[in-house]
Image (cartoon, rainbow, N blue to C red):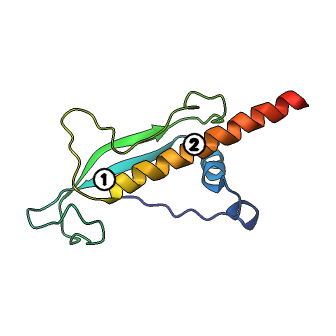
Amino acid sequence: MLCRQIHLDQSTEAHADALQIDLVEQLKAGSVSFDLIFTLADISDNENDPAIAWPQDRETINAGTVVINSSSPQHNGACDGLRFDPLVLPEGIELTKDPILNARSAAYAESYRRRAKESFFGLFKQGEE
């Protein structure tokens, strides 16, 4: 498994979009890929408490690779207006009783609400100019 640490220069490090800036820079050199490594639970593993780490010897599988070939701005892009929710799952996938999932869902909803508000007021301000 290949892991890469991200080292940002000081001008980028404090920027709110530092990871996006890093991705765009990497894409200039070619595609960027990420392996989706799943750790499989053992019958003794507690899947409902994220504070309890599973042993390092658990079986892992590479469930696939995400390959990114290009990037585009989010504003007015293909994903503008979409919101990720970890509780919306495809048929055949079930939630655990992990209480963090509900907290994440609420946090993602709040993040989306704030971004939508910023976009709305940004468009409103543009109309005044």
Question: The N terminus appears in which quarter of the rendering?
Answer: bottom left
Determine which residue is flagged by label 1: 37
- Check whether the beta carbons of the residues at disc 2 and disc 1 lie within 8 A of each other: no
Q: Look at label 1 and name its amino acid.
A: Ile
Q: CA distance from mark 2 to mark 1?
A: 31 Å
Asked if 35 appears above or below 31 in the picture, the reply is: below
Quick check: can you spot residue 49?
Answer: yes
Asked if 6 appears above or below 35 in the picture, the reply is: below
Q: Nearer the viewer, residue 116 or 12?
A: 116
Dot 1, crowdedness within 10 Å: few (<14), some or many (≥20)? few
Residue that appears at 84% across and 27% down? 127
The mark nearer the N terminus, 2 or 1, is 1
Determine which residue is flagged by label 2: 113
Left or right of residue 72, residue 107 in this image: left
x and y, in percent, of residue 48 in the image: 22, 61
Question: The C terminus appears in which quarter of the rendering?
Answer: top right
Q: Look at label 2 and name its amino acid.
A: Arg
Q: Quadrant of residue 84?
A: top left
